[in-house]
Each structure stands twice: as structure tokens, then as C-alpha cells.
Amino acid sequence: MQRSDQLYAGKAKSVYLTDSPELLILHFRNDTSAFDGQKVAQLDRKGMVNNKFNAFVMRELEKHGIATHFERLLSDDESVVKRLEMIPVECVVRNIATGSICKRLGVEDGIDLDPPTFEFFLKNDPLHDPMINEYHIRSFGWATEDEVKTMIERTFQVNDILKSMFLKSDMLLVDFKLEFGRQDGKLFLGDEFTPDGCRIWDVNTREKLDKDRFRRNLGGVVEAYEEVAQRLGVPLD
Ligand SMILES: Nc1ncnc2c1ncn2[C@@H]1O[C@H](COP(=O)(O)OP(=O)(O)OP(=O)(O)O)[C@@H](O)[C@H]1O
Ligand SMILES: [Mg+2]
């Protein structure tokens, strides 16, 4: 697989064209950002850990019938994926209330949400990813009614699959965000599932094992990601 021109570079990953028009290379960099890119750092090994973590989760989801963009690992910090036309929204499910939802709704941190909540956010850093609803998505043409319905259904399916996967290894999947895109009219899960885009707590101590360690200057960020990977049996070396 030949890596060709860079298509775009985000805050944590760079995307490259390849010799095949339907495939891209995702390069997971060590760059880490929070608060819409206002706080940034380089964290050694993070690109490698996230690349392998994402591959593991995407394969697990495929086994359970979720169509994802993931094709294969290319190197320690690169993967081959389907080239998608990304839908510019984030799909968020929360099993426990923490972070922005507590500020927004004035609810207590750490309460269980039964049923889990679902939220859409518009991917737009200058506007700080505002929360939107499915009417905005349809009215502005970001996705069709069918795609909206499928994104909601799939995100809840992913929640069921991953919640039990994490719990088997003594971890709580607190919340996460997914991005979807289309190829040939079909919807695929795109982007990544890594501790950069979800919250994971130890089931007994409720210790944070995700990017909140970076947001809150708790230290041991990549060490926590590696701990999660090791508990799940993700091969890192
Ligand atoms: N299969 C795919 N095909 C095309 N683009 C993709 C695919 N998977 C992910 N992307 C896009 O690649 C970019 C990945 O970079 P990164 O996650 O670093 O971006 P980011 O800084 O979070 O920016 P953004 O706010 O656009 O996500 C994102 O814009 C993401 O939507
Ligand atoms: Mg991103």
C-alpha cells in the first residue's frame, strides 16, 4: 500500500490518499488536544496505542455485525480504512453523567443514566461543537432521515457491545462519541474508538482511565490507555 498525498490533518490524526481511490491511510499521531484544540501536548507512544486499540475495537464491532471503515493495520501507528464521505456530526451515548452534561443541565456528577442518553453535536471547533438535534441534521442536509435513524440505532448497538466488553475487564464505559460516513450510499462507522473519545472508569475505584487524565492534568495518560488495552487483551508490542 503506497502512502500518497495528505488529504487532511486533524488534531490527532492525519489522513492520506493511497493508490486505491476507495482506501485511505489513517496516521495516529502522538498529538493530544482538549477543549477544542486550546490545550495540546505530545504524548509518547499514544499514536501507537490508539492505532492498535482502535483496530481491536473495530474488529470486535465487525464480529458483532457493525459495518466499520477499518480494513487493516499498516504499521504501528497507521491503519488502512475505507474512504468515507464523513457526516459532520458526533453521536454521543452516555451511561453515566459526567463532564459537559453536568454543567449544561446542572446534574450531579457520576449518576447512572437509565436508559442511557443520546446526543448529536455538530463537528465545528470554532463554534465549540454545539449540540444539535435530528431536525437540524435533516433541515441543513447533513444527513438523511434514514441515516439519522441508522446512526442512532448503531450507536446504541455499539454501546451494548462495548459496555459488556469493558465490564468483563472490570471497567465502566461511561460515555463515548462516534462518527459515521458513507461510501457508495452505505453507512459505515468511521474515525476511531480510543480512550481519546470515550470515558472509561475502573469499576471498583472509579479511577479515570481516559482522556480526562489529560484534561484534568492527572498525569499517567498513556499509561492509563495502556492499562485499558492490557486489560482488554489488545496486543501492543
Ligand atoms: N474513513 C474516513 N474517511 C474520511 N475521513 C475520515 C475517515 N475517518 C475519519 N475521518 C476524518 O479524518 C479526520 C481525523 O482527524 P482527527 O480526528 O485528528 O480530526 P479532528 O481534529 O478531531 O478534527 P475533526 O474536528 O474534523 O474531527 C476527521 O475529520 C475525521 O472525521
Ligand atoms: Mg477527531
Image (tube, helix red, strand yellow):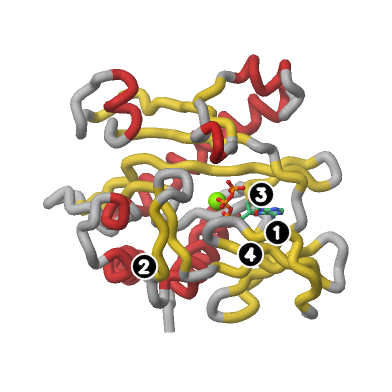
Q: Is residue 143 above or below residue 133?
A: below
Q: Which residue is mark 1?
A: 8
Q: Tell whether 177 sits left or right of 97.
A: right
How would you rate the neighbour count of disc 4 (Cα within 10 Å): few for under 14, some for 14-19, many for 20 or more?
A: some
**Which numbered disc flags the more N-terminal residue, 2 or 1?**
1
Ligand 1 within 8 Å of disc 1? The answer is yes
Residue drawn at x 47%, y 44% is 36
Residue drawn at x 69%, y 38% is 87
Give the total number of marks visible in the rendering: 4
Q: Which residue is mark 3?
A: 67
Residue 199, how many percent across, how many down? 34, 47
Inter-mark Cα distance, 4 to 2: 22 Å
Amino acid type of disc 3? Answer: Ala
Badge 3 vs badge 1, beta-carbon distance below 8 Å: no
Q: Is residue 153 above or below residue 107?
A: below
Q: Which residue is mark 4?
A: 14
Residue 153, how many percent across, how many down? 57, 31
Residue furthest to the bottom in view is 237
